[in-house]
Amino acid sequence: MIMSEPSSILTFNEVEPPFPLLDIQTKAVQDFIARKRGSVTFATGIGKTAVALESIRVLIQSRQANSALFVIPRLALMQQFRTEASRWKVPEGLIGVFYGAEKNPRLMTFATYQSLLKHPELMDNYDIVIFDEVHIVSGEKMGSLIDRSMSRPYVLGLSATIPKSMTELRRMLPVIADASIQTGVEVGRLAEPRLIQVPIELGRSDHRLVVDSTQRMDNCVSSLSAMGYIKRDSDVFGLLKGEFPGKVKALAYTYVGARARRNKVLSAAEVKFEALVAIIEEHSDERIMVFAESVSAIEKLCEYLEEQGIRAENISAKTAMPHRAKIFQEFGDKFNVLVSVKTLEIGVDLKMMGLEGDVGIAVILASGREAIQQTQRMGRVLRAHTDKDRALIYVIYSPEFESHMVRQIQRLIT
């Protein structure tokens, strides 16, 4: 049962922000309430979650809404969001959760995307629906969630950035507030980023594999473009779902396979590991976060570092929650290098885990092209702190194949 009785709403009157909101956050709240639909695209660390919680507070306390559903990308983030709600003085009895093992909806409920896909009717019970990391809502199934949410009075999307290629999402939830990394620096929420380029030259074997994979990708894109099925590389992924001719499907899968092989080589090239060791030795007394492209790459990297006498731990979707908590606890005490694929890119708030203060160095080995991925990676180390006025972003890359990534990061931080 969802608690939205008058007594519950009165209790919600005690909710308040635990800190003064920025002007850009307040304006985002006002614009959302006025428009009732939209997305807030703030760089990681500026405070998108605060915009959502303040919107919920204002709407419920003013009796314009009675309940809120907060949709999050991963179960691992559930406790983080519940803790943040408690910081806003949301009474524990009004906070509900909805996922596989526990389905207990309340006035303010946190649900995972996967659980909502299985029970989309849950949205019908809420006046406010918040989609965290809304850029992950793609494809027919996920897109159906946005479609269904349109019947609700208020719908808000949160993201560091929404790709321009997601035209339908941008139409349904248009960007109503935007703030870049530089804006975050100017308002004091983010440390000044400093990009340090570390170019490397691939070995002969790795170079040959990357060239071959790149050629296969280009051939697939050329064929699919000539057939009229895509306009850009990223469109290929949309061909993996839905009904398409066998030849089209085959080309799409060939592209994806070649791309995975290419990224795996670029992410796990030993020459990059050697460059990373030099960075670690230069910052031997500082905590460093390293991002690679695949689970196999980070496991291989940790083995390589161990051979060099450097202890490193890795976190991925496979890492059990108790072990993950232990890793966070020991980071900076028993080891200084933490490696991840995407688990630390999406939604994780290092401040809540006591890590953010002196984590000011990120090293990117991956060849990820999406701006959202780079923004989230940098966001892990950009949050400002009294002991941190700068953040170092190292990019270890092949100038022949990965210059685009450096240019992308440069655009994001200026």
Image (spheres, rainbow, N blue to C red):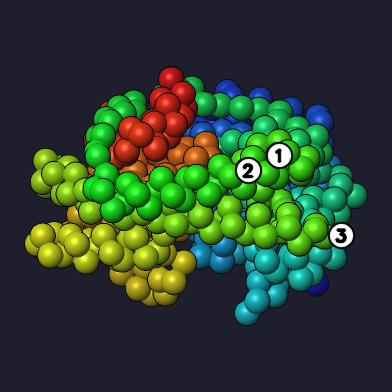
Question: Which residue is drawn at the image coordinates 28% and 31% (left, top)?
Answer: 197
Q: Which type of secondary structure does the marked residue at label 2 adopt?
A: helix
Q: What's the distance in space between the residues labelled 3 and 1, CA to CA?
A: 40 Å
**Badge 2 local density, few (<14 within 10 Å), some, or many (20+)?**
many
Which of discs 3 and 2 lies nearer the camera? The answer is 2
Q: In the drawing, does residue 60 fall left or right of residue 19? A: right
How many numbered marks have been drawn onto this rendered protein structure? Answer: 3
The residue depicted at 10 percent of the width and 46 percent of the height is 281
**Residue 124: x percent and y percent?**
86, 60
Q: Within 10 angstroms of label 3, few (less than 14), some, or many (20 or more) residues? A: some
Q: Which amino acid does the dot numbered 1 rest on?
A: Ser
Q: Which residue carries the number 2 mark?
A: 221
C-alpha separation, residue under disc 3 versus residue under disc 2: 41 Å
Residue at image location 39% in from the left, 48% down from the top: 210
Residue 286, visible in the rendered structure: no
Q: Quadrant of the C terminus?
A: top left
> Three-letter amino acid code at disc 3?
Asp
Q: Residue 82 carries which label?
A: none
Along the line of sight, which residue is nearer the eye, 179 or 209? 209
Q: In this view, does 239 lie to the left or right of 329?
A: right
Q: Mark 3 points at which residue?
A: 124
In the picture provided, is 235 more to the left or to the right than 84? right
Q: Are marks 2 and 1 in contact (CB under 8 Å)?
A: yes
Residue 158 left/right relative to 333: right
Report which residue position mark 1 lands on. Answer: 225
274, 41: nearer the viewer: 274
- Residue type pointed to by label 2: Val
Location of residue 335 with respect to 366 vertically, above or below: below
Q: Quadrant of the N terminus?
A: bottom right
The quarter of the displayed image where residue 58 is located: top right
Gap in Å between the C-alphas at discs 2 and 1? 6 Å
Determine the image quadrant of residue 162: top right
